[in-house]
Image: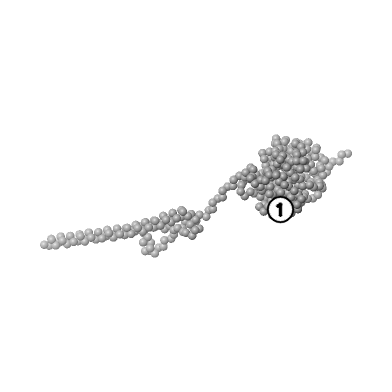
Amino acid sequence: MTRLMLGRTLERICKGVLLLCLLHFLIMMILYFDVYSQRFDLFSRFNNGRNGSRSNVSGAGSGHHYYYYNLSRPNTTLASYLATGEQLVPSVQPENTQTPSPKPLPPCPENPPGLVGRLLIEFSSQMTMERVQKENPNVTEGGRYTPPDCRPRWKVAIIIPFRHRENHLKYWLHYLHPILRRQKIDYGIYIINQLGEDTFNRAKLLNVGYTEALKDAEYDCFIFSDVDLIPMDDRNLYHCYDQPRHFAIAMDKFGFRLPYAGYFGGVSGLSKKQFLKINGFPNEYWGWGGEDDDIYNRITLNGMKVSRPDVRIGRYRMIKHERDKHNEPNPQRFNKIQNTKNTMKKDGISSLTYRLVQVKKYPLYTNISVEIGKPPPRLIKG
């Protein structure tokens, strides 16, 4: 009897333990699925936030912020965070503040599409600097301009020897700035003003212009132009070529013809390499004439040839004027031209001396005032 009661007691105890185990198992399963559902919900939010950031890179700019919760501690749940009072600190991704780099500009076309062709050039209407400045708002201080929509091959310095030609300069700027902009030229204009009233020296002023322009920018092409010559066709492109260039091949004062085969006067152009190869221009031609023939000799003696545009394109009009004072014809020019071969290595850019007085940048050009000395005294034949 006692044994029977003991057996029933043990049976009840075992059933109780079994029920407790089953209850414990059910509780654990409930807790497990509860935590799992919370983790799954948080994971879904994480993915939604990440996908949203992908679809909108500039989320901060649009007013939406996507938060990333750190639940990386082992054996922790969202409920445990809430129970301990810890706040979930959002981890905000850094904003992408980098702006996309601009696309490189294409090369400027060899034949710009905006060219007009033959131009009507006249000097009867009154011209002012104010009018010229209003006509060229895109030209920056110092007479600089760069095409905004393409990349020019050459960086061009246009150099003008100058003294007492203010009226001519107004017309030159009036016509040349629009022409050069249509030609898609990256350029700067430099007026080389000879101070004083001593004998004029065109070629030496051009050497000064070359030297001073290189102090202002890294030019690789140089156009040398008289202030009284205006091109009559904008297809006469003011840049450098494989050979030294003579632009003004058909002036109205010569009946729109080349006066002689070796003529290199008026408007010409050389690259920096070509200019240095001939040691620049001669410094010893005081007065009118001869220096352009000396330059032509330097070019041919150094194995280069002069290139020219078509005669229908290389037409120029000259502003009529009286001969300048202190620029009388040079009586020594013919003897000097015959000796170019002997003098060009020692007389040129390598031997240039001058005194820089002032550099002043105006809206349409850069004015460079210099003193270049005076001619040596002439020997009197006894």
Find residue 117 and report its horizontal and vertical position in percent.
68, 44
Which residue: 75% across, 39% down? 257
Disc 1 designates what residue?
132
Q: Percent position (x, y) of residue 233?
A: 70, 44
Query: Which residue sits at x=53%, y=53%?
Result: 98
Residue at the far right: name it: 382
Residue 99, placed above or below residue 305: below
Quadrant including the N terminus: bottom left
Q: Give SS at disc 1.
A: helix
Q: Amino acid at mark 1?
A: Val
Q: How has the structure been colored for display?
A: one colour
Total marks placed: 1
Q: Is residue 255 visible?
A: yes
| Whole-percent x, y for residue 231 in the image | 72, 45
- Viewer-proximal residue, 122 or 103? 122
Taking the image as drawn, is residue 294 in sight? Answer: no
Quarter of the picture holding the C terminus: top right
